[in-house]
Image (cartoon, rainbow, N blue to C red):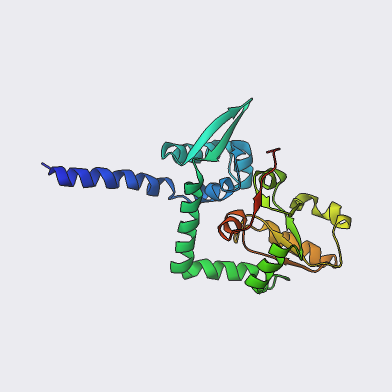
Amino acid sequence: MKSPNRAFKDAIYEQFARIGKAVSSPKRLELFDILCQGPRTVEVLAKETSLTVANASQHLQVLRAARLVETEKEGLFVIYRLADQTVCEFFLAMRVLAESRLAEVEQIKRQFLEGREGMEPVNREALLELVRKGAVTVLDVRPAEEYNAGHIAGAISLPLKELEQRLSDLPRNQEIVAYCRGPYCVLSIQAVEMLRAKGFKAVRIEEGIQEFRALGFPIAVNEEV
């Protein structure tokens, strides 16, 4: 028979393990990354993660059972959101741990970016200071609903799918800085490649909204979410 002390420890670590089990899927981690940007319907989440709606729903139910996400009904749609900001902070801390301990992360990233124009390392601090001062044109190339949920104050919303049609709206005499969801989002990579091909001076900054918030940048939220 277990001692009360052992029963207590087993019960506590069993609960902790619920979180580990819930996040032990690559697709569920990707869902976290998107939900850090703001609430989404299961249909949007499925499309963003290349899952069927049924599979996305199953993954989300696992996260909900661990009380990491919550749902809200809006008309015919079910909206998923992170339970609170600490869930996103947990995801970011886990990502940083993986980056620091797993050399494969940097290798995969380097191989993907190798040879892509405009993806060379930049002086991050200097670039962030230009962003902070408003000395560059900052483009948020995420979908509009993500921009509305939270964006760098002063950034222009220009979703990637609209970029080519709106090039005439952009200044050619100022450097353009594009950002999206963070270091593993490819939207800003595609945006910079398109802008450079059209003769603009453009660079990508790896940081996303959560990183900008941690760095102390003012984050604006539109009423229309």
Q: Which quadrant holds residue 39?
A: top right
Residue at 80% x, 69% y is 201
Query: Residue 107 is drawn in which quadrant?
Result: bottom right
Q: Is residue 122 left or right of residue 59?
A: right
Residue 59: horizontal and vertical position, in percent? 49, 41
> Picture coordinates of residue 46 (x, y %)?
60, 41
Q: How many marks?
A: 0
Residue 220 on image: x %, y %: 67, 48
Q: Image quadrant for the C terminus?
A: top right
The residue drawn where x is 67% and y is 51% is: 151
Evaluate whether residue 176 shows in this view: yes
Identify the residue shown where x is 79% and y is 67%.
175
The vertical placement of 223 against 106, above or below, is above
Q: 216 and 194: which one is in front? A: 216
| 155 vs 83: above or below | below
Question: In the displayed structure, would residue 2 be above or below residue 186?
Answer: above
